[in-house]
Image (tube, rainbow, N blue to C red):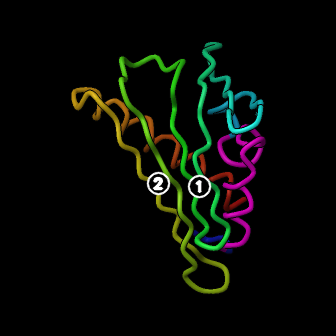
Amino acid sequence: MRAAAEHVWDAVRDVAAVHERLVPGYVLATRVEGDVRYLTVPGGNVVRELIVAIDDEQRRLAYSAVEGFRLPLTHHHASFQVFPEGEDRCRLVWITDVLPHEVAGDVRARVERGAQVMKQALES
């Protein structure tokens, strides 16, 4: 990605501004109450996520979606980690694990679309 690791990490760790800094349009609004984040997505669904860890040293955020998804998920856990690759470049790794396995393809398509939106937002 053509953006400094510090810039990308600052946006990723700003859990209350996902709709503005990370995936504008893909998420419409964000609300945080303690370790719980609520994301309003197009169509009005509200996804409730538990923020599991924010590690500034490793530039890693872990979270779990626990309620409000449209797919029949029984488990969701994901993490972002930012790796510097020079002064103005970095790699953003997004890992998402879900159950049941049958919905993994649908989740992958959503993650890929989200990654495109993130790249555009973070590089602009």
Residue lying at 63% horizontally and 53% vertically, measured from the top left: 120
Residue 44 drawn at (x, y percent):
65, 13
Our reading of the magenta stretch's main secondary structure is helix
Query: Residue 86 appears in which quarter of the rendering?
Result: bottom right
Left or right, 42 with respect to 116, comes to right
Q: Is residue 20 magenta?
A: yes
Residue 111 as seen in the image, left or right of residue 45: left
Q: Quadrant of the N terminus?
A: bottom right
Label 1's element? strand
Front residue of 24/101: it is 101
User: Above or below — where is 5 with respect to 53?
Assistant: below
Task: Return the mark for residue 94.
Answer: 2
Q: Quadrant of residue 32?
A: top right
The residues bearing labels 2 and 1 have C-alpha atoms spaced at a distance of: 10 Å
Residue beneath disc 1: 61
Magenta residue span: 5-23
Left or right? Give the position of 27 relative to 68: right
Proximity of marks 2 and 1: CB atoms separated by less than 8 Å: no
Of labels 2 and 1, earlier in sequence is 1
The amino acid type, in three-letter code, at marker 1 is: Leu
Q: Position of residue 75 (x, y in %)?
A: 38, 30
Quadrant in which the C terminus is drawn:
bottom right
- Vertical comparison of 77 with 36: above or below: below
**Amino acid carrying mark 2 in the image:** Trp
- Label 2 CA crowd tier, 10 Å (few <14, some 14–19, many 20+): some
Question: Residue sitting at 41 percent across and 52 percent down?
Answer: 95
Circle 1 Cα neighbour tier, 10 Å, few/some/many (<14 / 14–19 / ≥20)? many
What residue sits 29% from the left and 34% below the top? 104
Please tell me whether mark 2 sits on a helix, a strand or a loop: strand
Give the number of the mark in front: 2 or 1.
1
Q: Is residue 40 left or right of residue 90?
A: right
Furthest toward the top, the residue is 44
